[in-house]
Image (cartoon, grey):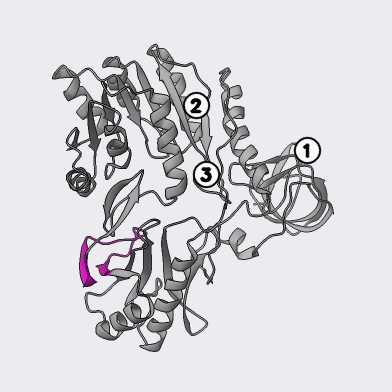
Amino acid sequence: MKLNTPVHKNETLDGTVMDLTYQGMGVVKVDNFPIFIPNALPSEEITYGVTKVSKNYAFGRVVDWKKKSADRVEVKNKQYTQTGIAPLQHLAYPAQLKFKQQQIAELLQKSHLDIEVLPTLGMDNPSQYRNKAQVPVRMVRGQLQTGFYKRGSHELVPIEDFYIQDPKIDAAIIVVRDLLRKFHIEPYDEQTNKGVIKTVMVRRGFYSHEMMVVLVTKTKKLPMVQELMDGITTQLPEVKSIVQNVNSAKTNVLLGEKNFTIFGKPTIDDQLMGINFTISPNSFYQVNPQQTEKLYQRAIEQAELTGTETVIDAYCGIGTISLAVAQHAAEVYGVEIVEDAVQDAKHNAKRNKINNAHFVVGKAEDQMAKWQEDGMKPDVIMVDPPRKGLAPELIEAATKMEPKKVVYVSCNPATLVRDIQLFATQGYTVKQPIQPVDQFPQTTHIESITVLSR
């Protein structure tokens, strides 16, 4: 069926880029029909080729620039755009921070919400910040490779320097890759569902420098395990833990249920806000500790705690924010649906001798209703939900408890704006500016802190 569109595949056209999408793509329009183009910035005049056309939009690629944006910087490596590792690498860092501030401001305006958005808190070095990497291992042209998938595909692009990762982690991945090659350990093949090694995951403590290597295998048997272990520990003295994770399922889920510690201890340690945390292969732990400290510090300041308050942390994970808040409040109650995370949170509280933080397993909205029935009266509720934002039931449960404040840490401006409107129907409004924090430089992700008051 031929599509009736103003542009067609393989056409070459000229245009001016008008906008930048949430995914960091430039937008050119022909008769109001949008064409999305990677590595193109607003105000640039370009020649572009149309690569894919659907009913309501198309995709293209830049063939040539007639006029470049003043905010353009040299691309470090086009693979970072291809794989989506650093989709904003061509945008100068001050302009990235502005882009993130504007994203939130525009969404608020569209919903007729008159709320100020402060400048984004950025990083001194907006690269090499990730403390965790998980890279697929595949056969590419007859050689075992580690790298990252091309956007929207399962084609592996071999990469050695990931740009946004701790360079020590990049170096560790190369060591592991070379050992896997040396001992002829078979990489996983998605087509045949055969092979041994699927993924290499490396975590490194920002303060402790302790390193963990996780080898995700399809098979329970890992050949040459002793030789691998010796090779890794000889070349990487920071490694304190090597774990084999068995994931035999044909799935996009990265880790399987079972972990076997094959060297050292089953966890590593690190600090955040001066608190010690134990991190296991499955732990959800913030990947940019420097910015997480800024984020939590700001969230605690905006909660205006005096030390007498009862605080609920509605998505507490392994207790990172709860334990930081506990030092500024009378009692903190954390709830989290992942059982292992709650065990970690309890362990972390004990380790740090924090006795005023209490953790339970459950769905946040159900647990809040229970707490309310028990007569709990929180002064502040903190929420740090996943990208899908808050369930309407959670907003209802939270506002029924009548806290003075709800501190909302968001990783998705679209669901934040939706939730602000839902809170307004329950009598909670935003009286202070929203603070964006750049947790993921070079990418389009945006974190922010919003305070809702009764």
In the image, farthest residue toward the right: 66
Q: Is residue 261 magenta?
A: yes
SS for callout 1: loop
- In percent of width and height, residue 238 lies at 35, 70
The secondary element bearing badge 3 is classed as: loop
**Circle 3 sits on which residue?**
445
Q: Disc 1 vs disc 2: which is toward the camera?
A: 2
Q: Nearer the viewer, mark 1 or mark 3?
A: 3
Amino acid type at mark 1: Asp
Q: Earlier in the sequence, mark 1 or mark 2?
A: 1
Marks 1/2: CA–CA distance: 30 Å
Q: What residue did someone put label 1 on?
A: 31
Query: In the displayed structure, does residue 445 sit left or right of residue 12?
Result: left
Residue found 33% across the figure and 45% down from its top: 274
Give percent across and percent down for residue 259.
22, 65
Q: Is residue 223 visible?
A: no
Residue 294 point in image, percent of width and height: 46, 40
What label sits on residue 417 in the rendered view?
A: 2
Q: Looking at the picture, which amino acid does disc 3 mark?
A: His
Q: Which residues are magenta?
A: 241-265
Which of the two discs, 2 and 3, labels the residue nearer the N terminus? 2
